[in-house]
Amino acid sequence: LFVPVLGGLMSMLLVLYAVGARYGDVDNEVSTGGAQIARYYQPFLNVSIMIFVGFGFLVTFLYKYSFSAVSYNFMIACFVYLWNILCAGFWENVHEDDHHGHGQYRVFLNMPLLVEGLFGAGAVLISFGAVVGRTTPTQLLVMAFVEVIFYSLNFY
């Protein structure tokens, strides 16, 4: 059951990115000399290391679950990172539409949104640490899928 669920969720993400995601304002970024990238790149690297290395090897102290916990951590972190970017971008668009009336429902990929995707992965990995060894990989994927929706809704 795990492989079809993971394949279905990743296929859904692929379609959603193809249909609803666009790159940020590249012309504006070039004209400002890459100020947004320069501002967010270092935090992006630091949070990435925390998510993939820090959380990944934090759970290796569990002798019985050390190898599976590390592999599940990488799988969940990669899935949640991609899913949270879409969810956070969607709720950001809903929030901006309420206040500004733009009506634009595409997710524009930019550095703050990429960092926010990693923070969502951190929130899910904290929950993962509480249930590691008690759940199946399929249950972890479902938990991550649902938790990200509410995490990003709460953020905006």
Image (spheres, rainbow, N blue to C red):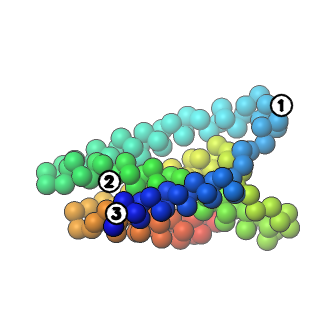
As measured in the structure, the alpha-carbon distance from the residue carrying label 2 to the one carrying label 1 is 41 Å
**Helix, strand or loop status at disc 3:** helix
Of residues 96 and 19, the one nearer the viewer is: 19
Quadrant including the C terminus: bottom right
Residue 153 location in percent, x, y? 59, 69
Read off the residue under disc 2. Answer: 72
- Precedes in sequence: disc 1 or disc 3: 3
Q: Can residue 100 be seen here? A: no
Name which residue type carries label 3.
Phe
Name which residue type carries label 1.
Ser
Q: Can residue 22 be seen here? A: yes
Pointers 2 and 1 in contact (C-beta within 8 Å): no
Residue 47 vs 121, above or below: the answer is: above
As measured in the structure, the alpha-carbon distance from the residue carrying label 2 to the one carrying label 3 is 12 Å
Residue 1 location in percent, x, y? 33, 67
Residue 33 location in percent, x, y? 77, 28
Name which residue type carries label 2.
Tyr
Read off the residue under disc 1. Answer: 31
As measured in the structure, the alpha-carbon distance from the residue carrying label 1 to the one carrying label 3 is 46 Å
The residue drawn where x is 54% and y is 68% is: 149
Please name which of the two marks, 2 or 3, marks the residue nearer to the observer.
3
Residue 2 location in percent, x, y? 34, 63
Residue 32 vs 59, above or below: the answer is: above
Q: Would residue 127 be found to the left or right of residue 98 on screen?
A: left
The residue drawn where x is 37% and y is 48% is: 74
Of residues 126 and 23, the one nearer the viewer is: 23
**Disc 1 crowd, CA 10 A, few/some/many (<14, 14-19, 20+):** few
Read off the residue under disc 3. Answer: 2
- Precedes in sequence: disc 2 or disc 3: 3
**Helix, strand or loop status at disc 2:** helix
Residue 76 vs 54, above or below: the answer is: below
Please name which of the two marks, 2 or 1, marks the residue nearer to the observer.
2
